[in-house]
Amino acid sequence: MISTKQLDNGITLNVEEIKGAKTISCFFAFKVGSLYENETNFGICHLLEHILFCGTKNRSSEQIKEDFNNCGTIFNGSTGVYHTRFYIKNIVDFFEKSFEIMADMISNPSFNKNEFIKEKKVVFEEMLRYKDIPNEELYKECIKHFYANSNLKNLPIGEPPTLTNLSVEDVKKFYQENYTTENCIISFAGNINFNSAKKLVEKYVKLNFGKPKINVLPFTKSNHTIKSEVVQIQKAVNQSLVKIFFVAPNSKDENYFPFIMLANILGGGTSSLLYKHLRDKLGLVYSINASTLNNYNSGALIINFATKEENVTTAINEICTLIKKLISKGFDTKLLEIEKLKAKINYVSASEQSITIAGSNNIDLIENGEIIPYTTILEKLNAISLNDVKRQAEQIFKN
């Protein structure tokens, strides 16, 4: 049973009760992420996410972690393009304690200056770690070009120049303006009913009342164009990493599910067409896959592989040849049915885990304003035809 309601204080509360479950999971989400930053505060959402783990008016940074550990809480936070989220999971007996700690962390941050300086250093170290991973560095550079005319070009992790200039006062002001009741969605899933969840929220969550300063952009149907270009990074690595980006539908588009099936058929695993052709048949790569992006004004299909430098052109030509042949000859019914079955199994499996349910419902409310039942998703998957997938291939690969 799923219940969603905006409470009198403005917080949106969502609860999916799973009778007989032994755990409860909860996601706190705030509709503010890197999309809503500007040139002066780029990276502030990510930094704030870190700062909220650095102590409250009631607990030190060490005490937060110790209290979570003492009751066995699974917890973490993440910063995205549209939102910043925090989650907890625990067995029923210890869940209220876990919730109280997380609510204290989010409601009562101390913004201690010494902790702020220390955590800034931690975020710089995180940036350096990603810079040392060629695949991450290449992805970041590709995103900058793919979304050149949008704030989507800024990944949530931030950049050293703006992070250096952010003060504890800047972060505190940003928190006060955006971590408000009407910008907060709290989703529960597991052995808890709506009334019990409501009591926990009203007892422990004390946010600034009212609307956030930032106007949240609507998650609209795909509308994005790019100019074709090549991005290159010179680095001392043993293989050349390659990412090929194509404009694709996002989840608001009626073609979204046929697009996902296309991506899976092309590069969804060891039985995919790209893997079987470039690795199994030609031995050009160790691995190759197709990943997807789902952003508010555009999705993306990304073909990823790595190979020796002298094989790059051959591999790209083989990919192009395979795609052209696929479009001209059509798709195999058996392949589509297998991918539909795998997708359905994934959705059904996810619907049995409290942390996945809470997280998925949370995202649905942020992006769609309502929960999309997995039964509706299964119906959409069942309705996909070979012609639907072929049309998507023609559209996405036309350039």
Image (cartoon, rainbow, N blue to C red):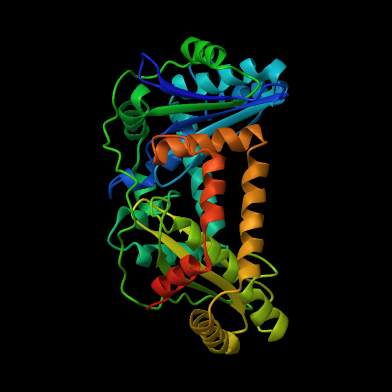
Q: Eyeballing the image, is 175 above or below 7?
A: below
Relative to 248, is 325 above or below?
below
Query: Measured from the top left, where is residue 174 in percent x and y?
Result: 33, 32
Asked whether, in this view, residue 224 is left or right of residue 269, the answer is: left
Q: Position of residue 53 (x, y in %)?
A: 53, 30
The residue lying toward the viewer, choosing from 174 and 307, is 307
Quadrant for the N terminus, please. top right
- Which residue is at a point 34% across and 47% down the rendered structure image? 35
From this viewpoint, is residue 80 visible? Answer: yes
Residue at 45% across, 57% down: 256
Q: Is residue 163 above or below residue 111?
A: below
What residue is at 52 percent from the left and 59 percent from the top? 384
Q: Position of residue 104 (x, y in %)?
A: 51, 18
* Quadrant housing the C terminus: bottom left
> Eyeballing the image, is 238 above or below 104?
below
Q: Work out whether residue 389 or residue 349 is closer to the camera in this orientation and state it.
A: 389
Dividing the picture into quadrants, the one containing residue 93 is top right
Residue 109 appears in the picture as rendered: no
Task: Name which quarter of the figure residue 225 lies in.
Answer: bottom left
Rendering coords of residue 178 (x, y %): 33, 30
